[in-house]
């Protein structure tokens, strides 16, 4: 049994305790939460820390498979150039080096206080790592293919990959890569399975300006890139509407859909999306957006609409560190009006809900096993993160 205390214990965004502690059993399940308030006293076995205690973080978007590409792709060249970098470098290293990089990334995430990850996988390369990890993973088996005649083949391969994860006791669902990289037929197959399994979907959304343009009239920088790389878009047709609307209507209305990046999403996109699906989650990966496009989503419009926001790190191909705290710091620097407790909800309970694991993760509550993070060097006066704030994993 351990008793972990701090100046503040942020059980959830609307439950902040002063001079308090959480009691955990040896498995990390919370058995008690006690607040001293202004009447602090010493009790046996109490480990008291300077800072705030928060639940373990949820990383709603990562690609472990790209961990070996850290600092390999030139930053701020835009999405087409980034995609080109991934395509060229993805298999550029020995399998053992790729495995090592993935294992290091997994360990780093745990050190950063991350307890649950939604990980995009194109292969079954991460199965062994995920079964051994102390992090819980939901694997999004990602498919792409704009060539409608190859949809059956692509989907079959993904079904096999998903089965490998599931036979190892890992949760997995088949998801489209991005709005623009999946044919109608492939969308149909994903959607049919999602209906049948009530699966969680994830999709890269509106990550670059020309993504919308491509759907309007099949022009723009992104489409030009595909054309010049010889990727077959001959059986892919524009819809005349923005990317998000075009993709969303091809996905199940009643499934949870994790929309990732949303860098170029406008208010009108959000409003149309909400008319179609009321189970949307909006994941921001700000440091990756700065790395790839040198731009951030217009986060205040999402806040204003009271949307379910989550935080992702994306991969080490577009980020220096897989740290949710670092992502929160970036948002706070650019949008200082957003309260810390709101940011914390994005980094914890919203992600737990996305993965249907809110009974274990997301808040500090008796009976849950959410992980306990200490944030040191916290700005108590303004109740905000400082640039020097850092995570210490206590459980
Ligand atoms: Zn991604």
Image (tube, rainbow, N blue to C red):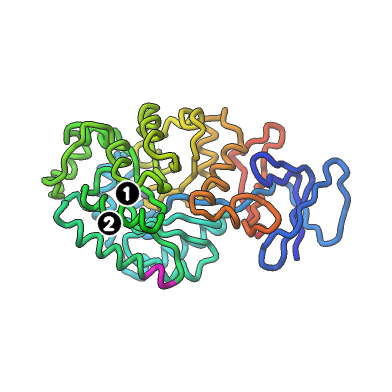
The label on residue 89 is 2
Q: Quadrant of the C terminus?
A: bottom right
Tag 2–tag 1 contact (CB < 8 Å): yes
x, y (%) of residue 258?
41, 46
Residue numbers of the magenta segment = 164-168
Q: Residue 277 sits in which quadrant?
A: top left
Q: Quadrant of the N terminus?
A: bottom right
**Residue at image point 16% right, 57% down:** 150
- Asked whether, in this view, residue 368 is left or right of residue 173, the answer is right
Query: Considering only order in the chain, which callout, 1 or 2, is on the residue closer to the N terminus?
Result: 1
Instruction: Reply above or below: 237 against 63.
Output: above
147 falls in the magenta region? no
- Asked whether, in this view, residue 45 is left or right of residue 351, the answer is right
x, y (%) of residue 211?
26, 37
- Asked whether, in this view, residue 359 is left or right of residue 270, the answer is right
Q: Secondary structure at mark 2?
A: helix
Reading the image, the residue beneath label 1 is 73
Q: Residues within 10 Å of mark 1 (few under 14, many from 20)?
A: many
x, y (%) of residue 336?
56, 29
Q: Residues within 10 Å of mark 2 (few under 14, many from 20)?
A: some
């Amino acid at each position: 049994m351990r008793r972990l205390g701090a100046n503040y214990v942020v059980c959830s965004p609307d439950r902040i305790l002063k001079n308090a502690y959480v009691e955990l059993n040896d498995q990390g399940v919370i058995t008690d939460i006690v607040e001293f308030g202004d009447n602090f006293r010493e009790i046996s076995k109490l480990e008291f820390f300077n800072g705030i205690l928060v639940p373990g973080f949820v990383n709603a978007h990562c690609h472990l498979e790209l961990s070996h590409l850290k600092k390999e792709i030139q930053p701020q060249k835009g999405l087409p150039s980034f995609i080109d970098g991934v395509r060229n470098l993805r298999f550029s290293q020995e399998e053992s080096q790729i495995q090592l990089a993935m294992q290091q990334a997994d360990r780093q995430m745990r050190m950063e206080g991350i307890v649950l990850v939604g990980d995009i996988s194109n292969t079954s390369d991460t199965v062994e790592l995920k079964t051994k990890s102390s992090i819980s993973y939901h694997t999004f088996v990602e498919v792409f293919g704009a060539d409608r005649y190859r949809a059956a083949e692509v989907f079959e391969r993904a079904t096999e990959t998903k089965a490998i994860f599931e036979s190892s006791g890992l949760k997995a669902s088949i998801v489209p890569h991005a709005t623009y990289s999946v044919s109608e037929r492939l969308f149909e197959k994903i959607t049919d399975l999602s209906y049948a399994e009530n699966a969680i979907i994830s999709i890269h959304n509106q990550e670059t300006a020309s993504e919308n343009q491509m759907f309007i009239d099949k022009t723009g920088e992104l489409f030009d890139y595909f054309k010049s790389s010889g990727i077959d878009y001959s059986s892919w047709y524009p819809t005349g509407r923005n990317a998000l609307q075009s993709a969303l209507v091809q996905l199940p209305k009643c499934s949870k859909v994790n929309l990732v990046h949303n860098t170029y999403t406008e208010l009108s996109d959000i409003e149309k999306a909400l008319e179609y699906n009321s189970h949307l989650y909006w994941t921001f990966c700000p440091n990756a957006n700065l790395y790839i496009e040198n731009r951030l989503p217009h986060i205040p419009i999402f806040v204003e609409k009271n949307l379910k926001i989550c935080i992702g790190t994306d991969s080490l191909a577009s980020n220096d560190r897989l740290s949710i705290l670092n992502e929160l710091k970036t948002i706070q620097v650019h949008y200082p009006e957003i309260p810390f407790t709101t940011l914390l909800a994005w980094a914890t309970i919203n992600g737990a809900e996305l993965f249907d694991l809110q009974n274990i993760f997301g808040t500090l509550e008796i009976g849950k096993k959410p992980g306990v993070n200490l944030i040191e060097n916290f700005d108590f006066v303004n109740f905000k993160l400082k640039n020097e704030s850092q995570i210490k994993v206590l459980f």
